[in-house]
Amino acid sequence: MADGAVLTTRQAWERCVGRRERLTGMVLRFGLLDQVDDVVHDAFVAVMGMPRLYPAGFDALLETVLWRRCLIIAAGEAARQRLVEHAALHPPATGDHADRVVDQVHAQWLLRRSGVLTEPDIWMLEMVSVGYRRQEIADMSGRTVDEIDRAMRSVRRRARYKTQATVA
């Protein structure tokens, strides 16, 4: 077969099947154990749907298509995992929702009237209470993570001092 010759459909399928074991190993290295056969098959179908297939670059093309499919699946899985782990998206703890709402409103009222915390402090505590991470709070407030950490330590110290002074 000459370098410029195009593979026949039969030749292309034979090359696909001949590369199956190597492609399966690539998918396994991505950690997609449950999807190995589907990903390899999808790569076969995608390559076979191309208008002309040449022997010189066929193996590289097949591996590139498979690699890209693995990346897409892995990225989708990572995004899904981030959503699953995001505290703000978790269902609320069991109990009466109305009681929690009243408790939150009461706590906010007390914090605002205690004079211990400023509005930015209260906002930061609210963000933490609904599950935002320090980096997300820093991004929203235009501050650094170190500044958020210092502010949180200061808030805790002031609240602790106020409660100790009230109890004593």
Image: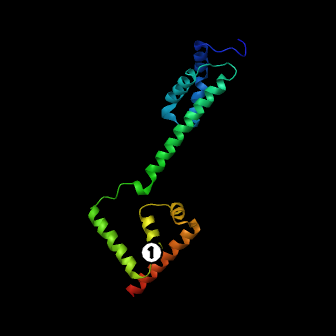
Q: Position of residue 161 (x, y in %)?
A: 46, 82
- Name the colour scheme: rainbow
Residue at 31% in and 70% down: 103
Q: Residue at x 56, y 20 (%)?
A: 48
Residue, disc 1: 119
Percent coordinates x, y for residue 114 in the rendering: 39, 81
Question: In the rendered image, is residue 25 in sight?
Answer: no
Rendered-image quadrant of the N terminus: top right
Q: Is residue 149 above or below residue 14?
A: below
Residue 76 seen in this snapshot:
yes
- Binning the other alpha carbons within 10 Å of mark 1 as few (below 14), some (14 to 19) or many (20 upward) gives few
* Up-down relation of residue 34 to residue 58 (above or below): below
At label 1, which amino acid type do we have? Glu
> Where does the C terminus fall, quadrant-wise?
bottom left
Q: Is residue 101 left or right of residue 137?
A: left
Front residue of 18 and 136: 136
- On the image, the x and y values in percent for residue 91 come to 35, 54
Relative to residue 77, is residue 6 drawn left or right? right
